[in-house]
Image: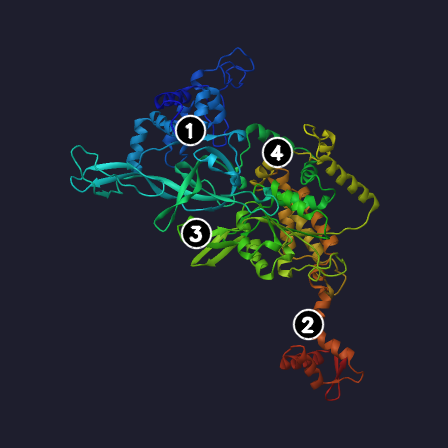
Amino acid sequence: MANDIPLEELMELWRSFFQDSRNRPVDKFGKEASAPKCTMCKGSGLKEDTLCPKCKGERVDSESIPTYSDEIQKVSREYPDGERSVSVTWEAVADFNGRLSSNLRWNLDETLDSAKYVVQEFIDEDTKERVREEHRTKINLDVVPVGIPDELYEVEISGLRKEHLYRTVKLRGLVRKATPVRPRMEIGNFECDWERHRNSFIQDFFTIKEPTRCTSEGCKCTDFKLRDDLSQYIDSQKIEIQEFPEDLPPGAQPERLSAYFESSLAHKVQPGDRVALVGIIKPKAQFQGRRQKSEFDIYLYAHSIDEKVGEDEDVEPSPSELIEIKELALREDIANRIRDSLAPAIFGMEWEKSALALQQFGGVDKELPDGTRIRGDIHMLMMGDPGLAKSQLLRSASRIAPRGVMATGKSTSAAGLTAAAVRDEFGEGRWSLEAGTLVLASGGIACIDEIDKMSEEDRSAMHEAMEQQTISIAKAGINAQLKSKCSVLAAANPKRSRFDMTMPLPSQVNMPVSLLSRFDIFFIITDSPDPDRDKLLADRILESHRAGETMTPGEAADVETTKSLEGPIDSRLLKLYIAYARRLRPVMTHQAQNRIKEHYTKLRNVYHNLDDQDKTMPITPRQLESIIRLAEANAKMHLSETVDLKHAERAIDLMELFLKVTLGGDVDFAFFGADAKQRRKETDPRMILLDLLASGPPEGMDKSEILDLMDERGFNRKKSENLLDGMVESGDGILRDGYDKYRKN
């Protein structure tokens, strides 16, 4: 497609744009460089002129205003170790020249190529020579557009049609796969067979093309040899994106699209990232054998990553947003405000939302000198009667998290949770790994609904991911260990429709104890009648329906009704707050350590007035680690550099609620259906001997009879005999009458 603006004029416009001091350079997020300060009041200079916006009298030195020419020099001096691109905003280009922005919209490839040529003019020769000598390459800086307006470009992947071919589009999607970065031949150097003339030939994107005839004067050679050592290369990477599953209508399958990255964009995204890509839709020929088919595939040749939502480290608040975040952290009710901002449409569930808020922040990962790693992510399980908004709460958590992935247990397999070995054209026919839910959620939260509906074989894949936070794969000749650093938020329903608090958990939920014990905290949500609460719940549901009712065309919903269903903190600000807080690594104070230690020892000896054999186990070391993680999450929530006593107290309150309400104060009974004393009666041979003699005849039992009964219970006969004789000699509860009669003392 021909340019609307001639090439020479287009290059002159870019040259003026880069030199104009009114156009301050921006970073990869589209944020402008800071303006120079007024010498009198230290206020920032205006973009339109050099007058101070505060005192209006003192002029700012125009030479100190950063320009794109300065930015290009800065980036080129760090080449190739630093950034390899210069970002420009669509708004700045539109303000500078309307024709240039129009050309950027309709002829993206040609317009950015001309900008790359102009950029070379601003790189000094000394820098170019240094890069040639040190790295045997030339400086190649891209011009990347950011801040593209959605209304001009945005298209759904499933909505791509023939009209979008060779058009600029903006596509949002989830990165499913990514190939390693590989060099692609951009300009091939060919040597003719006759006179060894060298011919440079621009290469096709997919295949190598040779010149048809030597370009040297007088040479008619048509046979060439590729000199790959003299050719020019560019970094290249292929990725695959798919539509967001949560945005699809019921029954629809998310469509996928291949995207190609080159130069500075290569290796910018990872599987699991949510991105908005700006680029050109182009066709790709399909072949049946050697014959080309009339049907074409399409792909996206990407020019910029306009948005990226990955791990929390990638999110950088602006200076104004940072001030807003720190002011919010100073509020005394910050914990309650964050809690109420999570799924505000759901009534009640204050303690569950409080735990969910702490899960969003997470604890602190630690690595010991011997290489042992202690996870900081918090796992949470909600078990409750049907129809209590558990699924809705999970979806809300996945949307708030910096990286959230949703899955449903009934339709999820082990490969879907971990990784699948696939072989297709995307990987050039080779086996490769396609990331599953727990890998895609690394750095965020994996929400698994109806986890009890998963098969036992599929659930077993979660054990390593939840504790070691890695996934080991050995499939199709691939041995790899994938990172799965994520929190797990799961929901389950009881087997018999309703929970019975008098029965142990494993008998009511289709989940083994080994998996249940890996959750730091879980709640049992029951549907109990309460007239006052039911009235408030009905009011909230009616408000939700009233706010979502279809109005007449052009009529807006009631502002007051809508406002009542919104949280105290805006969702955008809440995401930034969580992402910023997750990077903190608070250190626990001695007061907090002593308080947690005191609480732990108290619970371990809660039945101190009983004999040692009768003591139950209300808490285990695994719950102790959970308290530590909850305390650290509390500190992060308040943007504190230390874990103080108040943070430890709040974590203890939450753990006590979990132990008393959910587990009834006894881990043993909740998990095994019996307290420690009862379980010892079933497993301790000493106590079994005493029970046998107590239930036997008053005159006592024969030795052979006792040993036969112990043998039936799976105990070694010789060891049982030795134990019996030892208890008689020590007088430990057994008396011997005559030669072979034994009875309880």
Report which quarter residue 260 is drawn in.
Answer: top left
Residue 309 in sight from this viewpoint: no
The local secondary structure at tag 1 comes to loop
Query: Could you tell me which secondary element the residue under label 4 belongs to?
Result: helix
The answer to whether residue 46 is seen in the rendering is yes
| 97, above or below 723, in the image | above
At 66% across and 43% down in the image, what residue appears?
Answer: 647
Q: Are marks 1 and 4 in contact (CB under 8 Å)?
A: no
Residue 684: assigned label: 2
Marks 1 and 4, Cα distance to the nearest angstrom?
36 Å
Pick whichever of labels 2 and 1 is earlier in the sequence.
1
- Taking the view exactly as shown, the residue that stands out farthest to the right is 531
Residue of label 1: 107
Residue that mark 3 sits on = 424
Contact check, label 1 and label 3, Cβ < 8 Å:
no
How far separated are the C-alphas under marks 3 and 4? 41 Å
Q: Earlier in the sequence, mark 1 or mark 4?
A: 1
Q: Secondary structure at mark 2?
A: loop
Q: Amino acid at mark 1?
A: Asn
Q: Earlier in the sequence, mark 4 or mark 2?
A: 4
What is the distance, in whole Å, between disc 4 and disc 2 at their CAs? 57 Å
Image quadrant in which you'd find residue 237: top left
Q: Residue furthest front?
A: 294
